[in-house]
Structure formats: C-alpha cells, structure tokens
Amino acid sequence: MPVALLPPVADEISRALAALDVESVSATYRAQNEFIHLDRLFPEAVVAPMVDEVERVRTSINRNYIPRHKKGGSVGYYTLREQAPAVLTLYRSPAFLDFVRRVTGAPVQLCPESDPHACALYYYTEPGDHIGFHYDTSYYKGTRYTVLLGLVERSSSRLVCQLYRDDPAREARELTLATEPGTLVLFHGDKLWHKITPLGENEERVSLTLEYVTDPGMTPVKRFVSNMKDAVAYFGFRSVFGRRGTRRFSDTSPGIGAARNAGTRRVG
Ligand SMILES: [Fe+2]
C-alpha cells in the first residue's frame, strides 16, 4: 500500500520555503547556469522523519559497482512510496513543487509512477563508495531537474560541481560542497557536471534525490535504455523489471494508471 502523506511535515516544508526570498534564489540559480544550493534549508522537523526512513528501508538497499565510475547503495521509488511517508510528502508537496517551478522557471511535474528514480536514497556506507563525474541526462522528452537533499553526513565525501562546463563562453567554476542534513541542491540535469568523492573509513553519507520533469513522455527505446541503467547502476533487475514496479497501484488513481506506461529515465 502506498503511504499516507504527513501533514505536520508538509507544514514544516511550507514554513521553510515561505521564509525564502524565492526571487533572489531564482536569480542566483540562473546566474549559476541553473544550479543552486541552500545550506540547511529544512529544519530538524523535516529531516528527522526522513532519517528514520533511511533506517527503515536499509534492508532494501541494492549495492552496485561499476569499475572506475560508481560504487554504493540505492533504494528506489517503489520501496519509498510504500515505506517512506516523509520523503513522499516532500516529493509531492504542492509548496515544494511551486518552489521548484519558481526557481527554475519551468513547468515541472512529478515523474511517472513507473520511474524507479522519481525519488531515491543513495547510501555511501563502505570505504571508496563514490560516483564519478556525470550529467543527470534526461531520457524524457522534457527537461529533467534534480533535487538533492542531505540527510546523513558523517563523511569526508563531497559533492563536486563544475559550473558552466557546457558553456564555451565561460570559464568553468568548481564547487565542493558538504551536503549536511537539510541542505538542498537543485539543478538542471543536462547542465551540471558533478560527482561524489570517495567515502573514507568508518564514514557514512546518505542523500535523497528527487526528479522533476517538464514532459514525462518517453520513447520506448529510451525507456528500455533508462531501465537498463537503473537496473545495472542503481536498483537491480528484480526491482526495475520485476512485477513490483507496476502491480502495487491497481489504478486507484487515474493519474497513476495513465502514467504507468510513460517510462523511466536515468543516467549514472
Ligand atoms: Fe547525478
């Protein structure tokens, strides 16, 4: 069964966002080639329930290793939508969706229910866990935006971002960020070249990722490629291609039923 959302968490999300000067945030976002980070945006009242959920779904972690590119664990949307109400409350928060739209200036919407990467937790728990430089390329017909939210930060790992790499008219600028609990990063997936540096001994780092898109349509070929990437690099074949991804929602919602076959996306 999908989880029920949490009104107290939704209220705290709205309160934190209402305190922002969104026009100023949006101006900085644009000046940084569609990238923004907001240190400790969300308070303990938002972060703590999510950290509880980080522990709750730990038994569902799928670990993977792609030599010279990626090592780490992930829990995808199909698990989170059944066991992580605080995460789902943020993802579906109308106030947060409005915030993302105002900052990006794009008419973003939620990803289809069939996208295992709509929300995901990334676990860096073993020495050397990392992901190399990449873009979050959109497989959708529309533009894809990524939100990262720090939840657990007991590590020397850092999010390294290279701004303007896709703009030959500007000199690239590199930022190295610690994603402390409550710190939010928002960027255009095709514009930000980024990586997570390797975890050290006795360290741990967990972050949440949320995806929003302007057009959730996807060609069958891209859907297949996206699913293969998700299976190999993130959630495992059983999670991505098993019945699990489609059977739990028995068309109780018209939107969910319609979205089912719209496809998935992800690059790693
Ligand atoms: Fe990424």
Image: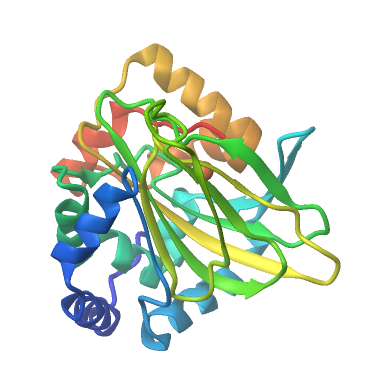
The tally of labels here is: 0
Q: Looking at the figure, which quarter contains the C terminus?
A: top right
Looking at the picture, tell me which residue is in the foreground, 185 or 12: 185
Percent position of residue 254, x then y = 14, 42
**Image point (56%, 28%), residue name:** 229
Please name whichever residue, 110 or 247, is drawn nearer the observer in this view of the structure. Answer: 110
Res. 94 visible in picture: no
What residue is shown at x 24% (from left), y 35% (from top)? 259
In the rendered image, residue 54, in percent from the top left (x then y), is placed at 56, 70
Expressed as whole percent of the image width and height from the top left, the position of residue 227 reads 50, 27
Residue reaching furthest to the top: 221
Question: Image quadrant of residue 250?
Answer: top left
- Judge whether residue 168 can be spotted in this image: yes
Residue 40 falls in which quadrant of the image? bottom left
Compared with 155, 185 (above or below) is above
Determine whether, in the image, residue 154 is placed left or right of residue 192: right
- Residue 46 against residue 5 in the figure, above or below: below
- Render colour scheme: rainbow
Residue name at image x 56 percent, y 25 percent: 228
Quarter of the image where the N terminus is located: bottom left
Residue 249 falls left or right of residue 75 = left
x and y, in percent, of residue 104 in the image: 21, 48
Give the quadrant of residue 221.
top left
* Front residue of 252 and 197: 197
Q: Is residue 115 left or right of residue 10?
A: right
Q: Nearer the viewer, residue 36 or 71?
A: 36
Vertical arrangement, residue 25 with respect to residue 16, above or below: above
